Amino acid sequence: MSASFPDRAAAGERLGLALERYRHMAGLLVLALPRGGVPVGAEVAKALSAPLDVLVVRKLGAPGHSELAVGAIASGGVRVVNHAVVQALRLDEATLDRIAAKESVERARRESLCRGDRPPLDVAGRTVVLVDDGVATGATALVAARALRHLGAARVVVAVPVGAEDSLARLREAADEVVCLFTPPDLVSVGQWYDDFSQTTDAEVQALLGN
């Protein structure tokens, strides 16, 4: 089996071509999910002549079971709650608030590392292309798409080089459009479809964002 993409930048170039119809659209904004989505998003933003920014999402882990998500928070103070899990675990609002407060500190730290002192770009009334390096479960992208709705985006387009079809189907319910170049029937992990899937560093993210 050969990988479909040499690296994230190459994947972004191909994704940019697939989004050509959005090139020069007034008010268009490209938001990448850090860290791996940023090299992809940088190439998409370049291809579409659009500004690039990040949208930071943090999972809210259940007490004592941090791998189990009870919800998530995103840039702009958005919180999305998995009510079925919350009810099953009998978590009250105060507990959710404590979990969210802790993760908000980490989200703010991550966002500061990515963006520095620059304020986030305003998405209200704009078409936003939300980019990641791929979709496996799609949980982060789903929260991000919902966050953009809360923040007033006029149109949300999720764009990824590779993704699992069942996860993409869920994303189509949250976004106005989902663009995916490659949907393998046997996707186990996103990284298997890249020759080079080395970790993107904070320094690389900062450089791509112009910090």
Image (cartoon, rainbow, N blue to C red):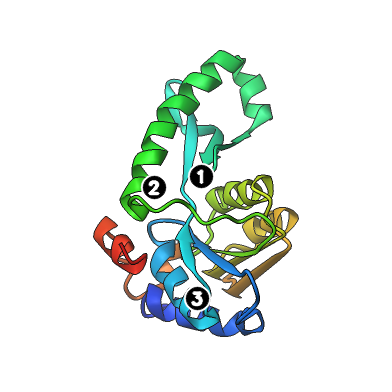
Mark 3 nearby-residue class (10 Å; few <14, some 14–19, many ≥20): many
x%, y% of residue 81?
A: 62, 32
- Where residue 1 appears, x then y in whole percent? 42, 78
Q: Earlier in the sequence, mark 3 or mark 2?
A: 3
Residue type at mark 2?
Glu
Q: Which amino acid, by three-letter code, is at mark 3?
A: Val
Say which residue appears at 49% left-offset and 69% top-offset: 51
**On the image, which quarter does residue 48 sit in?**
bottom right
Per the model, the C-alpha gap separating discs 1 and 3 is: 21 Å
Q: Which residue is mark 1?
A: 75
Q: Secondary structure at mark 2?
A: helix
Q: Of tags 1 and 3, which is closer to the observer?
A: 1
Q: Nearer the viewer, residue 54 or 94?
A: 54
Quarter of the rendering containing residue 88: top right
Q: Are marks 1 and 2 in contact (CB under 8 Å)?
A: yes
Q: Is residue 120 shown above or below 6?
A: above
